[in-house]
Amino acid sequence: MSRSRTVRLTAARLGLPATALGALAVAMLPAPIASANEAAPLAREGAGRISLGGAVSSTGRAPAMVPAHSAGPESVVVQPGDTISAIAARHGLRTTDVLALNGLGWSSVIHPGQVIRLTGAPAAAAAPAAPAAPAAATAYTVVAGDTISAIARRHGVSTQAVLDANALQTSSIIYPGQAIAIPSPTAPAPAAAPAPAPVLAAETVTLDDEQIGNVRTIIAVGRERGVSDRGIAIALGTAMVESWLRNLDWGDRDSLGLFQQRPSTGWGSADEVRDPVRATAAFFGGPADPNGSRTRGLLDIPGWESMSFAGAAQAVQISAFPDRYAKWEAPAYAWLATYG
């Protein structure tokens, strides 16, 4: 039977004009399936990561997106194993929008402890420059070993001015290849935030059972080897920066464990650097260093007791981001007092 005859017969049975029934049939046709090209950009995020945003569901329809203005947190702190796509999915956002808000690209790497913005204008959208200073900012590309304070000094501006120009905080992490806006030295610098602010932010961190267990291990190893409270606090702060006080089975290149020690540079085998007791003993070093003279721990650094908290940690770790240790000094002493 032809389609037109079927429509006329059905219309007659329902008491509807044939034209109305035809419109109803068209409206009930399934929505078109999204093309493969719509999901293709997210495939570049890498194998094994959750890919969302333009992904197509098993039903063939693109998942509904929550508008950017929906209620939710303004930012989140990256946890081990997080990806931008997973964070976006948890908050009903598109991966591309979260990348843009934070000035990131598909190849960008995020790390535990990093703050990811979920609302607001994209990171690249700076406030309009004053008419008298049209070139209020220049772009700078971060290289290995850079810190915000060092970048600011090289360009003759304050650290706070660079932080404000890029919507960053003193606890934010920068990475090689990231674009940083440098405000004009002649532009009035925004009022500096009170110095204790970043420390207070760190003090609000609540440790979970895994982190508390690792804190107690570090303290116990330090006590057993006669390390001073200052040395133990430096170890606690270092482990927080390097691994978020977790015994990680991944890291930069072959870095592993609480202190992200690298087997390829003599810190031990993969299993050894993931042994919290041995890794802590290697960090302290000294006569009981399980690595002998292959590596240099805190007790092997001449004059470490008179160094700054961050300086002593950096002398052992040789990190590309030496400024990151300082803000954990006060929390480290608090953990020592609580769990030691």
Image (tube, rainbow, N blue to C red):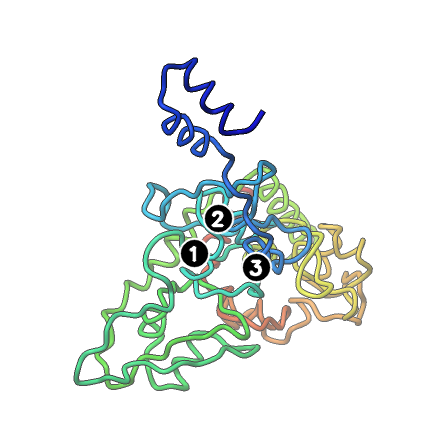
| Disc 3: which residue | 41
> 287 and 122: which one is in front?
122
Amino acid type assigned to the residue bearing label 1 in the image: Asp
User: Where in the figure is residue 235, as x and y percent of width and height?
Assistant: 60, 58
> 61 and 6: which one is in front?
6
Tag 2 secondary structure? helix
* Horizontal relation, residue 121 to residue 6: left or right: left
Q: Marks 3/2: CA distance?
A: 15 Å
Tag 1 secondary structure? helix
Whether pointer 1 and pointer 2 mark residues with C-beta atoms closer than 8 Å, the reply is yes
Dot 1, how many residues are within 10 Å of its Cα: few (below 14), some (14-19), or many (20+)?
A: some
Give the total of numbered labels.
3
> Would you place residue 23 above or below residue 322 in this image?
above
Amino acid type assigned to the residue bearing label 3 in the image: Pro
> Would you place residue 90 above or below residue 109 in this image?
above
**Which circle's residue, 1 or 2, is located before the other in the chain?**
2
User: Where in the figure is residue 180, as x and y percent of width and height?
Assistant: 42, 75
Dot 3, how many residues are within 10 Å of its Cα: few (below 14), some (14-19), or many (20+)?
A: some
Residue 78, which numbered label? Answer: none
Q: Marks 1/3: CA distance?
A: 13 Å
* Horizontal relation, residue 171 to residue 242: left or right: left
| Disc 1: which residue | 97
Dot 2, how many residues are within 10 Å of its Cα: few (below 14), some (14-19), or many (20+)?
A: many
Looking at the image, which residue is at 79% across and 68% down?
264
